[in-house]
Amino acid sequence: MKRLNNDVLNKYVDNELDEFEINELKEIINSNPEAQKQLNAHEMVDIILRKLEAKKAPAGINQFVMDKILNIPQSKSKVNYFFVSVIVVFTTLIFSSLGYLLSQVNFGESSSSTSLGVKEKIANFVSDYIPQVPALLDTSTLLFIGGSLTVVLLISGYFIIENHRSFKSKLNSFTH
């Protein structure tokens, strides 16, 4: 024990120190008047606490608390329909775009003498329409996409904050 702290003083007051620690503590106390004041304060608190009358808990308190804990209604998990709808919209857009692209590919017989496979037809279609992609990403289209995503983010933020407030109020109702 090189430093005097509240744990050591509490153990001393409760007679939990061995003889070596007691001797070391006495040396510190004899050389430091502030340490003596701390020990006196701990001893006074111990005397006051021992004089206090301990009140017994009401009969059946354990069972009452356990019944309250077990009877807390289990909340059903809520489905956040906003997030589900956003995912459904994006999934629908992706599949619709994919369906449109596949509908534009002619899978029937080609007029040429050699018949192309499906992979070759899709590759030809993509290579024909890739040059048109930059035209879709002009300033007005990017502004529309950015604005739409901003609205979705703002609405998502609103719902996240509302869910947090709801959670906080439920938590406070359990603790108070």
Image (cartoon, helix red, strand yellow):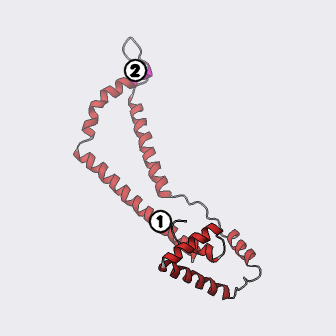
Q: Quadrant of residue 17?
A: bottom right
Farthest residue, direction right: 59
Q: In the rendered view, would you say 69 is above or below 79?
A: below
Q: Position of residue 27 (x, y in %)?
A: 54, 73
Find out whether the residues at labels 2 and 1 contact each other: C-beta distance under 8 Å: no
Q: Identify which residue is drawn at 41% across, 58% down.
A: 156
Q: Identify which residue is drawn at 72% across, 71% down.
A: 66
Q: In the rendered view, would you say 97 is above or below 4?
A: above
Q: Secondary structure at mark 1?
A: helix
Task: Name which residue type carries label 1.
Answer: His
Q: Position of residue 71 (x, y in %)?
A: 69, 70
State whether the magenta stretch is mostly helix, strand or loop: helix
State the quadrant of the C terminus. bottom right
Q: Position of residue 49 (x, y in %)?
A: 64, 84
| Label 2 CA crowd tier, 10 Å (few <14, some 14–19, many 20+) | few
Q: Residue 38 vs residue 157: left or right?
A: right
For the question of whether residue 7 can be seen, the reply is no
Between 44 and 51, the one lying in front of the other is 44
Magenta segment: 117-121
Task: Name which residue type carries label 2.
Answer: Glu
Separation of marks 2 and 1 at Cα, in angstroms: 52 Å
Q: Identify which residue is drawn at 45% across, 44% down.
A: 91
Residue 120 - label: 2
Residue 118 is a magenta residue: yes
Residue 38 is a magenta residue: no
- The residue that label 1 is drawn on is 164
